[in-house]
Every structure is written in structure tokens, then in C-alpha cells.
């Protein structure tokens, strides 16, 4: 399940309810910050508060950890709050997420558990994922397979609560489409509205299957409110995306190489997408989508 606000009494909110929530936040949005340092101070405080609220009274929890900006910032704040957590990282051989996760965890002394998947193990995870998620397109299966693999790794630890960086790309303009939009923040609002279909139904299905709760502090209403008061030019330029979050993270103690690491989606950073490509070829398909369509018929 996903935390309250997106999931209530065990049920995923409707798409209409979510869009109404975002419409209300947008309608009540106030003016933009005019001083960047003030914006960073307020935004950091609100983000730390959002994380602190979600960790109160929790003895131990997990973090889906890629060694990238979002998960590393979450782990850093949790460590600074003196919380007990474990970072979980999965990937196939040569995965950049595994490389970065090891490096960052060592530098900042985060507790880390990781697993390198063989192609055979990856295929088992992919087929298991397809039995869980309602959509079998390449992106949905690729992303969800990384989460499923991490949850399988964490099962023996009996961890039932996990932090996710979901929402950071939307509120801080992390996608290429933000660069192409005439108004960056307008596109951020648009992306938030579409998260129900793009993200929530996928993560809710996985959460229900494993009986876990996903904590999403970047989707905290107060965090959204403050992030959307940040001018678009403080979020994105021709060289960088999510600029203000990167600056906050680095100033909070995240190593520069981590804070400014280029974004790779989970399926790419873990090499899960490469696994799909190899499996498609092994089974005689030219395209990953055709392999998934054939596998779906066997479920």
C-alpha cells in the first residue's frame, strides 16, 4: 500500500479524488519565492519535517536505494534524524545503481543490503511482477520489477515499511518534458495530476501483494505546496534538472558526485531494461514488448 492520502483504509484513492487533491493544491497555491536562499531553507525544513513525521514511532524501515539524488537524500535525512533503517539495492551485473549505492553507502555509512541478479533470476522476478501489476508495458514492468526484487531481498528482514522517492521528479522538474514545456511549473502540476495512472496503480498493486506500506515524503502536501512556490528556473536549466533539490542535498552533506549524479530511471540504473532486451532476444523476439506480450499469455 501507499501511505495515507493516496491510500485510505487500505484502498487506493480514485483517480478523480487524486486529481481533485492536486487541483485544490494548485488553486490554493501562493506566489513564487523571490529569494533563492530563503526558498532552500524553507523547502529543506518542510522536507525534513515530512520525513520525521513518517518515521516517528517506527523502529526500523527500508529505503529503496539507488545511490542517486532522491534516495540518498532520504537516507541522509533519516541518518541525521538518528533513525534505524536499511538501504536495499538490486541490479544485474554492471548496474550503475549498484556501483553508486556501494560508494555512497560507504562514504556516509548507510546500512546497505544488495543483490546482483543473474539473468535467470531477473526473468523470475519479471514473471512474478507481471502476475502482480495490472499493466504489462515495458516501462511498468521494468520499474515494478526493480521494486519487487528489492522486496524479495528484504523479506527475510521482515521489513514492512519502505521509503520511496516517488514524486521528486514531478515537483522538481526532473523529466525532459519539463525542459520542453513553456511553463515548467505548469508541467509539474500536470505531471502530479497524472501520477495516479502512471505510478499509483503500479505501486499499490506491489504494496498489496507484499503487505508493505510505501512512504512518499516528496508527495507530502506541504512539500508539494512549498516546492511549487519555487520558480521553474531554479529547478531546471540547459545543463541540469532538479537544481534546487541538488543544492539542498549537497549543502546538507551529500557528496557532490551523488547530489549531481545524472538521473537514471530504476529500470535503466539497475540494468533491468537490459535484462528485458536480452530475454526478448533469447526467446526469439525483436522487441521487449513482444516478449512481455508472449509471457503474459503464459500467466
Image: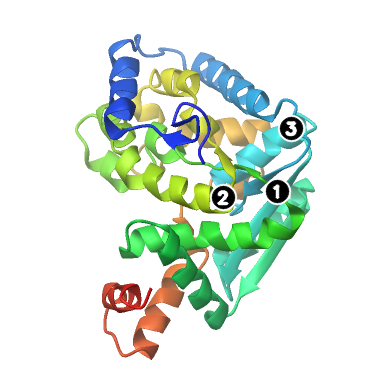
Q: Which residue is mark 3?
A: 58
Residue shown at 38% from the left, 73% from the top: 299
The residue where tag 2 is placed is 68
> Which of the numbered marks, if any, corresponds to residue 285?
none
Which residue shows up at 30% across the image and 47% down it?
A: 176
Q: Are marks 1 and 2 in contact (CB under 8 Å)?
A: no
Measured along the vertical axis of the image, is residue 34 above or below residue 121?
above
Residue 126: x and y, percent? 46, 70
Q: What colour scheme was applied to this rendering of the protein?
A: rainbow
Give the spatial CA distance, label 1 vs label 2.
22 Å
At which x and y percent is residue 26? 30, 18
Picture coordinates of residue 39, whole percent (x, y): 49, 17
- Name the residue nearer the viewer: 239 or 245: 245
Under circle 3, the secondary element is loop
Q: CA distance from mark 3 to mark 2?
A: 24 Å
The numbered dot on residue 159 is 1
Amino acid at each position: 500500500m501507499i501511505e495515507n492520502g493516496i491510500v485510505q483504509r487500505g484502498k487506493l484513492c480514485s483517480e478523480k479524488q487524486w486529481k481533485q487533491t492536486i487541483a485544490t493544491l494548485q488553486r490554493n497555491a501562493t506566489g513564487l519565492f523571490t529569494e533563492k536562499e530563503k526558498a532552500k531553507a524553507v523547502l529543506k525544513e518542510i522536507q525534513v519535517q515530512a520525513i520525521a513525521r513518517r518515521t516517528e514511532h517506527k523502529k526500523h524501515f527500508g529505503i529503496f536505494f539507488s545511490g542517486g539524488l532522491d534516495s540518498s537524500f532520504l537516507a541522509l535525512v533519516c541518518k541525521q534524524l538518528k533513525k534505524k533503517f536499511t538501504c536495499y539495492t538490486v541490479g544485474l551485473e554492471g548496474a550503475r545503481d549498484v556501483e553508486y549505492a556501494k560508494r555512497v553507502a560507504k562514504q556516509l555509512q548507510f546500512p546497505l543490503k544488495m543483490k546482483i541478479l543473474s539473468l535467470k533470476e531477473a526473468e523470475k522476478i519479471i514473471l512474478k511482477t507481471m502476475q502482480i501489476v495490472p499493466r504489462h508495458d515495458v516501462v511498468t514492468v521494468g520499474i515494478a520489477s526493480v521494486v519487487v526484487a528489492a522486496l524479495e531481498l528484504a523479506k527475510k528482514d521482515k521489513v514492512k515499511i519502505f521509503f520511496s522517492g516517488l514524486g521528486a521528479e514531478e515537483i522538481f522538474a526532473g523529466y525532459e518534458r519539463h525542459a520542453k514545456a513553456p511553463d515548467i511549473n505548469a508541467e509539474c502540476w500536470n505531471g502530479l495530476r497524472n501520477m495516479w495512472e502512471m505510478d499509483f496503480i503500479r505501486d499499490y498493486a506491489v504494496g498489496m501483494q507484499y503487505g508493505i506500506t510505501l512512504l512518499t515524503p516528496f508527495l507530502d502536501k506541504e512539500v508539494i505546496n512549498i516546492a511549487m512556490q519555487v520558480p521553474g528556473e531554479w529547478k531546471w536549466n540547459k545543463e541540469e534538472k532538479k537544481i534546487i533539490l541538488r543544492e539542498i542535498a549537497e549543502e546538507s552533506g551529500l557528496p557532490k558526485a551523488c547530489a549531481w549524479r545524472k538521473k537514471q530511471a530504476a529500470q535503466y540504473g539497475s540494468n533491468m531494461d537490459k535484462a528485458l532486451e536480452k530475454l526478448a532476444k533469447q526467446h526469439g523476439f525483436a522487441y521487449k514488448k513482444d516478449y512481455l506480450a508472449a509471457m503474459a499469455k503464459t500467466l
